[in-house]
Image (tube, grey):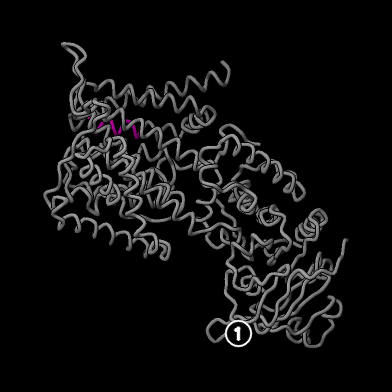
Amino acid sequence: MAQQQETVLTFRGLTRRFGGVIALNKFDMELTNGQILGLIGPNGSGKTTSFNVLTGIYEANGGSIEFLGQDITSWPAQKVYEAGVARTFQRSRLCLELSIFDNIMIGNHKRLNQGLLFNIFQRKALKEQIQENHEEARKLLKIFDPALAEKMFDPVGSLRMIDRRRIEICRALISHPRLLLLDEPSAGMTHEETRELMDDILEVREMIDGLSIILVEHEMGMIERVTDKCIVLNFGQKICEGAYRDVASDKLVQEAYLGGE
Amino acid sequence: MTQSLKDKLVIILLAAVIAAFSITFIAIEEQVEIFALLVFAAALVLGGAKLGITASIAQSLARNERLMNFAFIAATIAVVFWFREDHFPLLMIATVLLYVIACCGLNIQFGFTGVVNFAGAAFFGVGCYTAAVLGDTSVPLLLVILLGGIIAAIVGSVLIIPVLRTRGHYAAVVTIAFGLLFRTFLEVNDTLGGPQGLGVSGMNLFGWDFNNNIEISENLEISFYMNYVVLALIMVILTFVLMRRIERSWIGLNFDAVRLDETAAACFGIDIKRWKIVAFTLGNFLAGTAGALYAMMLGFIAPSNFAFSDSLILVSIVLLGGMGSLWGTILAAGLVVLLPEKLQVIQEYRFLIYAVVMILILLFRPQGILPRGLRAYIPGWRG
């Protein structure tokens, strides 16, 4: 793995409040190029909130976010995506009545020509763009499941949970992001399916140069297997950071999360 | 018989049946007969659906889109030609066509993008009044139709900020309020004729006066409404091409993404505001163009033509046909415009019946009579 120690993402004192509840409290974090970071902690500890603040869905109440050398703290969601951050959602947010291809193309927004006149009048060029992108999406989806790649024009609503997860991850990866945020990819899946999915993600990572990943996950086996580094959150605060082995043996963490004696 | 030949025969036969049915439906007057014809048609469709015939017809249609389009245009022309000498049927057909255009506008707005608009009749009305005001000036009348659309779009921009800020019920209330304001404004505005309304000059294309019957020979005098039908049909075809191109492009995809999940759309770079503005403006433009020609055809317009109930009719056409479904819009526009005219008995109970039908549709077939299918970017191509 090409591991330059270039910093991709930095949180400095990131804070987010909902009324009186502090969902994220002075969160400091750093992520380097190609790193996989596991974000763990009990329910309501601020994992998803940190994704939502990072991607611009929520505004930060304090602190700053730096991505690839730019301060993106107050950027809207669209601009954060343009900069190279793509995500999946805890509860799958695909457009169920649209086809697999449609859903993946939503994730490809920045690489498609969105001009009004282009789309309406330059049908030939548009047709080529559609076919090129279809081929690319098919190749990507094939890594996850070859059978699925042959059903590009089936509605997503007709698919199983694991297939929907795969499509959601393809939607995030199709635009070649620099940072991928995975919010509980194992939710609603068996151990075996989760394992398979993670293998596929790792395979794709080899193909996208310098892709960093933040993984929110409850499935500790998965965290142990794939992450380079872990951060444990509790009540919006970072309580521990380090390799999974060290983190798992930390007293504070055991009390807060693993339910130590 | 090969599959493709069979498909072609099916399509031509279907178009012929639809044409024959439409002609019969428009021609007969006896209430019992009309009622019987409707029951017969409903039984045919329901029976066909049970036996899987409609599904196989739908597949034949999907495989031969170009032929289907031409067959349906030919069917329309056949119906129009049948009634070439009769004013009233042609007036009704032209009205259906213009409603189709206005409802295509609404389809872009809430069928595709999910932007509700309960002021459709108001934007249609802006087009009408544009035609009334500009009709007597030296502006070419074809341009007036275009201007009707543009001015409707501009008037609509007043609503853009509230429409962007509100969602669901609130957006509905905002547009309802606008519709009521529009009507009140017309009623108190003396330059625009007040409650009495305004006369509108008829269409005139390069010296061709649309309001004169076309005398072909001693015993063939084509109704002047034919002019309007032909122009309206051309406009419908253009609107259809536009709608299809939008739907089958990244723009259509953006619209769908905005409608289905704004948060997810925003996380993938889709500018929610931009696409809502595009959809709202384009939709109002279409309603305005339809209104302009409608006013020229009727020759007279008044504020009472643009009441809230008229907006509701437009909305009900879209819901009845199926959100975002183009063929559904045509079918529903035909039913909603023609039924009250044909079934005089129901005239007074029109809104009661609409309400019941709408509730039934929303309960039992929320996707509409002819639901919109999945996006086929390139017809017949599946990768």
Q: Dot 1 lies on which element? A: strand
* Image coords of residue B342 (percent x, y): 21, 35
Image quadrant containing the C terminus of chain B: top right
- Residue at horizontal 21 percent and vertical 45 percent from the top: B133
Residue that lies at the very extreme toward the top in this rendered image: B218
Residue A1: where, in percent of width, then height? 88, 61
Q: Is residue A148 visible?
A: no
- Residue B118: quarter of image: bottom left
**Which residue has dot 1 on it?**
A22
Looking at the rendered structure, the kind of residue marked 1 is: Ile
Q: Check the residue under mark 1 and report the chain it is in.
A: A
Q: Give B326 or A112, whichever is nearer the viewer.
A: A112
Magenta-span inclusion, residue B191: no
The number of numbered badges drawn on the structure is 1
Residue at the (21%, 14%) spot, across then down: B216
Residue B302 visible in the current orientation: yes
Q: Position of residue A124 (x, y in %)?
A: 59, 34
The spot of residue B50 in percent (x, y) is 45, 35
In terms of depth relative to the viewer, which is nearer, A217 or A214?
A214
In the rendered view, tell whether residue B186 sits above or below residue A11.
Answer: above
Q: Main secondary structure of the magenta part?
A: helix
Q: Is residue A225 left or right of residue B76?
A: right
Indicate whether B68 appears above or below B218: below
Q: Dot 1: few (<14), some (14–19), or many (≥20) neighbours within 10 Å?
A: some
List the single residue furthest toward the front.
B138
Q: Residue at x 64, y 59 (%)?
A: A82
Magenta span of residues = B34-43
Q: Can you say whether B95 is above or below B318 in the image?
A: above
Q: Is residue B42 magenta?
A: yes
